[in-house]
Image: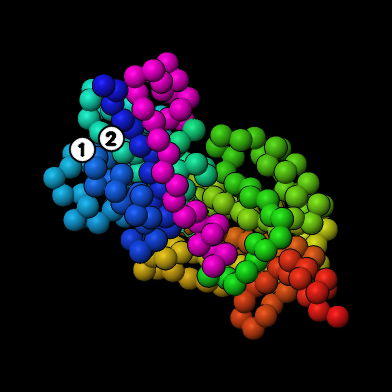
Amino acid sequence: MGSSLKVVGLGPGDSALLTPQAQKAIADADVIVGYTLYVDLVSDALKEGKEIISTGMMGEMARCEKAIEVARSGKNTVVVCSGDPGIYAMSGLIYELAEEYLDTLEIEVVAGIPALSAASALLGAPLMHDFAVISLSDLLTEWDVIEKRLKAAAEADFVIVLYNPKSKRRDWQIEKALDIVREVRSADTPVGLVKSAYRNEQEVIVFSLNSFDISQVNMLSTIIIGNSSTRMIGENIVTPRGYLNKYRK
Ligand code: SAH
């Protein structure tokens, strides 16, 4: 019988946003592998009696290799990720590293609520029309490529979601990204900043494109920049889908 490895999304943080399917995958596991901060998101009750392989020091590659090794030894293993495991997370790397074992190792991806959905809900309804998601992390992607995608998304009038806007070692990318969008989008375009969505430290701030304060941005921030029709309705950022234009005469 083959062993099983599940790559599980924990959602943004609050255990109320952990799906029952993800919860069951963790409950059924013998071993939980994950970055320390992600393992911390799993309740003690759910972790009880399980082997935990969590480390802040181990890089993504080492963590995935370890998870594959443990799963192949016959233990039901879950790799936990924040948000959705297929969005800037571990499921792709798990498949790449486990390619040669696919005959004997059963891999399953268990979806989670991604930060972009959490941020969108907290801001109102900014993602009602086409949007592009761009990570500002240039650790694995050349900055030139990121810049090209930002320009294209801005020019095509996509609502833009920015992930990984800042880290300890990366602090200039966010200003550069906003400048690219400012070239084509109006100064009063609503921009939402959501920090630590559905965690204790949660903060939701709305700016205009020109008043955006980058000093407010931290690692756990998701930023949503409106398109040319995005506007404020009360305190909420709303991107009209077009219903009223079409159906309300
Ligand atoms: N797999 C995750 C993304 C991991 S990349 C997902 O589906 O959401 C890490 C980035 O995700 C962070 O830099 C931040 O941009 C965003 N993020 C993750 N959790 C968040 C939260 N609780 N609140 C706001 N942004 C978050």
Residue 146: image location, x then y, percent? 68, 42
Q: Give the spatial CA distance, label 2 vs label 1.
A: 6 Å
Residue 105: image location, x then y, percent? 35, 23
Circles 2 and 1 in contact, beta carbons < 8 Å: yes
| Residue at position x 49%, y 33% in the image | 92
- Residue for badge 1: 30
In the structure shown, which secondary structural element does the residue marked by tag 1 occupy? loop
Label located before the other in sequence (2 or 1)? 1
Q: Quadrant of the N terminus?
A: top left
Judge by depth and name the residue closer to the eye, 128 or 200.
128
| Residue at position x 64%, y 35% in the image | 142
Q: Residue furthest right?
A: 249
Pointer 1 residue Cβ closer than 8 Å to ligand 1:
no
Answer whether residue 199 is magenta in the image: no
Start and end of the magenta stretch?
93-121
Judge by depth and name the residue closer to the eye, 134 or 211.
134
Q: Is residue 167 left or right of residue 40?
A: right
Residue 39: image location, x then y, percent? 29, 48
- Residue for badge 2: 77
